[in-house]
Each structure stands twice: as structure tokens, then as C-alpha cells.
Image: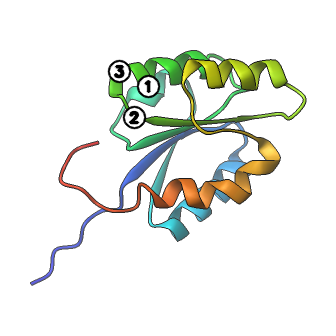
Amino acid sequence: MSMQTAPPVVIAYVADLMFGSKLSAIARSAGVKLRNVRSADAITSGPGRALIVDLELPDALEAATKWIETTGLTALGFGSHVDAQRLRAARVAGLDPVLTRSQLATHLPGFLVKFAQPTGDAK
């Protein structure tokens, strides 16, 4: 008898539902389930192995920083290429990687595959 293991969960705080659907498809192909949340407060509403945040959303950087400090886990931030100050602030706050929106589709599969292997822990 084989026991199926649920795919690992990565939390995503993104504004655009269509973009969120695209990220979910990329995550599925990497063997990860993406849990989309609609507010910064919802980031901590359930377990996740990593966090993806749209830095243009309200309280996204603050919530991601708190999440990193609380969990010790990885957070990926992305935003507009013209908002260099916000991208720099995310790097200083400990988000890694920090990408422009245009870089995200290229780098997201490699980021997610690192979290695809099931583990025994609840994170």
C-alpha cells in the first residue's frame, strides 16, 4: 500500500489573480503547491516552506520581513524594475532572491524546485 504525500506548500502574496494563476501553474510543474493569500496578515495563516511576495502590495515588505524573522525560512520578493529603492530595501531586509517582475518567470522554477521534496516537518 502506497501513501501519497501532499506536495510542499509555498505561500504567495500577489495582487493579480491572472498572474497568481500563472505562478500556480509554474509551481505545479515544479512539484509545489502554491497557497495564494490576499492580505499581508494571511501570510501567517498556515504553514509554508517559502514565501513569494509582490513588493508593490500594501505591507508586503514588512510582512515578509516578519515572516523571515519568525520562521527562519526563505522569501522571494519581486517588483517593478523602475522601483530600485523598493527592490534594494527588500534585499537589505533579507529577502533572497529579489527579482524584477520580468525576471520572475525565468527564475521562479529554479527557486521552487528547491522546495519540492516532501519532508517530515510541518513547514
Q: Are marks 2 and 1 in contact (CB under 8 Å)?
A: yes
Which of the 4 image quarters holds residue 14?
A: top right
Q: Is residue 56 left or right of residue 21?
A: right
Q: In this view, does 32 lie above or below 9?
A: below
Q: Distance between the residues labelled 2 and 1?
A: 5 Å
* Rendering coords of residue 71 (x, y %): 34, 28
Which of the 4 image quarters holds residue 59?
A: top right
Which of 26 and 99 lies nearest the eye of the viewer? 99
Which of 49 and 6 lies nearest the eye of the viewer? 49
Q: Do the residues labelled 1 and 3 touch (CB within 8 Å)?
A: yes
| Amino acid at the residue labelled 2 | Leu
Q: Distance between the residues labelled 3 and 2?
A: 8 Å
What residue sits 60% from the left and 64% below the top? 25
What residue is disc 3 on? 70
Which of the 4 image quarters holds residue 4?
A: bottom left
What residue is disc 1 on? 68
| Amino acid at the residue labelled 1 | Ile
What residue sits 77% from the left and 49% below the top? 103
What residue sits 83% from the left and 24% below the top? 84
What residue is disc 2 on? 73
